[in-house]
Image (tube, rainbow, N blue to C red):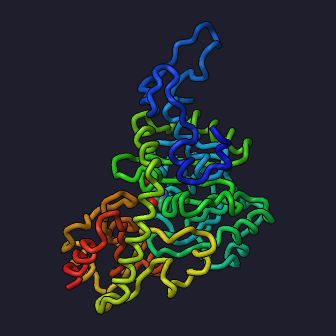
Amino acid sequence: MQNEKEMKFATKAIHAGLEPDPATGAIMTPIYQTSTYVQEEVGVHKGYEYSRTLNPTRHALEKNLAAIENGKFGACFGSGLAAMDCILKMFNPGDEIISTNDLYGGSYRIFTTIFQKYGIKFHFVSMHDTHEIKEKINANTKMIWVETPTNPMMNIIDIEAVSKVAKTSNCLLAVDNTFATPYLQTPLDLGADIVMHSATKYLGGHSDVVMGALIVKDEKLAKEIYRIQNSSGAVCGPQDSFLVLRGIKTLHLRVQRHCENGKTIANFLKNHPKVDNVYWPGLESHPNHEVAKKQMRDFGGMVSFTLKGNKLADALNVVKKVEIFALAESLGGVESLIGHPATMTHAAIPKEKREKTGVVDSLIRLSVGVEDAEDLIEDLKNALN
Ligand SMILES: *Cc1c(COP(=O)(O)O)cnc(C)c1O
């Protein structure tokens, strides 16, 4: 097969890292539901010894992910947070990490309630531009953590600009690429060192698996990640690896439709009399629209909005009244979901802190699915009236 580096996205998504099963010719990577592998004699084996260390189904997925993120090495975990846990275990007491202040609630929680007590110091800053990052950088800074688009405010952080700061300060740049997916944005091409995914979301794409992934280019960094993956053991199983491999084969098709529907719904909401602000990076009125255009191929299916009057009860009423949109946490599946960040995903963040970043009581977040846009709009229309 031609060099994977020269293939375009969809071809890589469907083929990279995958070979017909050597034993049977099966075109789909088998679910190698096994913990161990028979050795011919001590130390003589086919590359697999024990499934915590390496499993063929997981290995195929790790290679596939590395290819679609334009990286060299992939590592998969039992959840997105397990992938973050692996990154954070690279650091030592006294090390400092600068993170965006508008981020996934679970990321905030692992930083502040788990790793802070092991002596790692976290700073949460606005990354609207790089000046707050520069203010916090010192000799102990080891990593900058970026999530873009951010959850749930859909702010766009200029990855290339932040990577320049990281390079001059000799620290790593990690990007949570869950919302964008590699189809829309490849942070390693923009100077990031580590890409993290909650594969639970768009990569899996069918709301049937919880998984996380890391992708890097640098071999030394990859070795450290594999060492921690094997030593801490938060790996995903072969069945889940199979499901995500299967999901990735249609990632480009699904994300195209997520983007189209996201655009239709953002425009509908923008013109609705009861809606106050609409947050979708594809709108020209979005404050970071130009950065989004520069670093993303399209603008995704995540749309947030607030209601005029900003009443909690009104927002709760909307999320209760929708029928096609399902009231649920998570995102990125084929079905549309609706959520209320202040009481759901961001309940762990203190009220004052969340309101400062825009997560007000009437904020509603949509994960726009791949259904017919007309039906989704009808559903929202009824719920808003
Ligand atoms: C869901 C999510 C995570 C956490 O991933 P899990 O698979 O739920 O552990 C991290 N970052 C973002 C942006 C997410 O949406």
Q: Residue at x 61, y 46 (%)?
A: 66
- Horizontal and vertical percent position of residue 310: 33, 87
Going by the picture, which residue comes out furthest to the top?
A: 41
Res 333 visible: yes
Against 182, residue 246 (above or below) is above
Going by the picture, which residue comes out furthest to the front?
A: 2
Give the quarter of the image for residue 16.
Answer: top right
Against 93, residue 42 (above or below) is above
- Horizontal and vertical percent position of residue 249: 46, 47
Q: Residue at x 40, y 68 (%)?
A: 346
Q: Residue at x 38, y 87 (%)?
A: 270
Could you say which is closer to the camera, residue 336 or residue 254? 254
Against 32, residue 188 (above or below) is below
In what quadrant of the picture does the C terminus appear? bottom left
Res 106 visible: no
- Judge from the rendering whether residue 287 lies leftward or rightward of residue 33; answer left or right: right
Give the quarter of the image for residue 366.
Answer: bottom left
- Horizontal and vertical percent position of residue 206: 35, 51
- Horizontal and vertical percent position of residue 105: 45, 63
Q: Residue at x 67, y 44 (%)?
A: 72
Could you say which is closer to the camera, residue 287 or residue 123? 287
Could you say which is closer to the camera, residue 370 or residue 367? 370
Give the quarter of the image for residue 303.
Answer: bottom left
- Judge from the rendering whether residue 187 lies leftward or rightward of residue 378; answer left or right: right
In what quadrant of the picture does the N terminus appear? top right
- Judge from the rendering whether residue 71 lies leftward or rightward of residue 213; answer left or right: right
